[in-house]
Image (cartoon, rainbow, N blue to C red):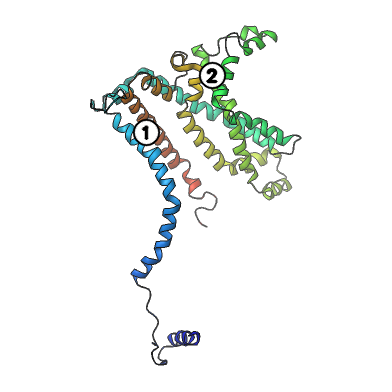
Amino acid sequence: MAFLREDTQTTAIAPGNSGPAGVSATAPAPAGPRRRTRSKWPARGELALLLGPALIVFIAFVLLPVALAAYYGFFSWSGYGPATDFIGLRNYVTILTDPDFHQALSHNAFIVVMSLVVQGPIAIGVALLLNRKLRFQSLIRVLIFVPYVISEVVVGLGWSLMLQSNGAVNDLLDKVGLGALATDWLSNPSIAIWTLLVIITWKYVGFAVILFLAGLQGIPEEITEAATIDGASYWQIQRHIVLPLMGPTVRIWAFLSIIGSLQLFDLVWIIWGQYVASTAGTSTMATYMVANGRNAGSYGYGSAVAVVIFLISLIVALVYQRFVLRRDTAGAITGGNI
């Protein structure tokens, strides 16, 4: 059979030869569409096996809750029994005209901007410092990352105890002779939002440092060594070589920080509580949703607030993806050519 197959191929390459009996002298016909379709089934089965579980989880825990929230947002529903009191867009009109929601939205916008302005430079500076050879370098990295892995409940309770009027912070200020600076860090509306920003920075700057360190270690040493040989100083190398190459990492961190700031809930709720959060000037869209939805017994209104938060986050994510992350996903270094 092996000799017969070899003869058949040889005869097909040389046109005009008449092969042995039963063997055609023409090239074999290409596989038809039916055969190609059959060959795709194993690949399709592999895709279904790998993507199926993740797709089911995504539909069950992401798309379905969003669809249910959008549905209940059109009803005045207390959470008991079926939703029958259809009110159309009234919940959404109330949300968009409520001054408390506007205030919560402005707090989220403030946290988004200030998180980028404060955490970004601090994290880049610490990452550049830790990227050099230092004593106890590994220990310092662990200590910086520790606040990020501590539970939000523990962080909230600890800071709320230290920042009380008779807490450890004011007591420390008194002992070092700065008692005039002691104040009510949590209840003063002109200071509370800055207190929240300090706590958020302490909690999440470690994650940014670790992310930037990973980006720094991905930069080839040959590039900085070549710049050093050419006479570039340390700061010139950081400014013109290292920071531009860290661009994709910084943009990914900024995206995660923006989305996290828009959905901020746990620390505010634990430290300030459901009522103090709005009077102290630290309420967010998520705390507004829980306070005016679940705690007020108006699940239809809370569902509508959830839909508004989802749409705001989705729009921000799509705009960021379109105008900022597009060059990274398209291949900024290779220009899209592999």
Which one is closest to the eye, mark 1 or mark 2?
A: 1
Rendered residue at 63%/13% (across/down): 169
Q: Answer with mark 1 or mark 2, whichever residue precedes in sequence.
A: 2
Task: State the residue lying farthest toward the right.
Answer: 135
Side (left or right) of 179 relative to 24: right
SS at mark 2 in the image: helix
Instruction: Say which residue label 1 marks.
Output: 311
How would you rate the neighbour count of disc 2 (Cα within 10 Å): few for under 14, some for 14-19, many for 20 or more?
Answer: some
Q: Position of residue 205 (x, y in %)?
A: 59, 30
How would you rate the neighbour count of disc 1 (Cα within 10 Å): few for under 14, some for 14-19, many for 20 or more?
Answer: few
Q: CA distance from mark 1 to mark 2?
A: 27 Å
Rendered residue at 35%/31% (across/down): 307
Q: Position of residue 182 (x, y in %)?
A: 61, 9
SS at mark 1 in the image: helix
Amino acid type of the residue tagged 2 in the rendering: Trp
Q: Position of residue 85 (x, y in %)?
A: 23, 25
User: Residue 270 — which label?
Assistant: none
Identify which residue, 155 or 80, lies in the foreground: 80
Identify which residue, 321 or 53, lies in the foreground: 53
User: Residue 194 — which label?
Assistant: 2
Q: How many marks?
A: 2
Amino acid type of the residue tagged 1 in the rendering: Leu
Identify which residue, 60 or 222, lies in the foreground: 60
Rendered residue at 49%/16% (across/down): 272
Question: Toward which corner of the image does residue 57 lie, by quadrant?
Answer: top left
Question: Toward which corner of the image does residue 151 lie, by quadrant?
Answer: top right
- Please determine whether, in this image, residue 230 is positioned above or below residue 283: below
Task: State the residue lying farthest toward the front.
Answer: 81
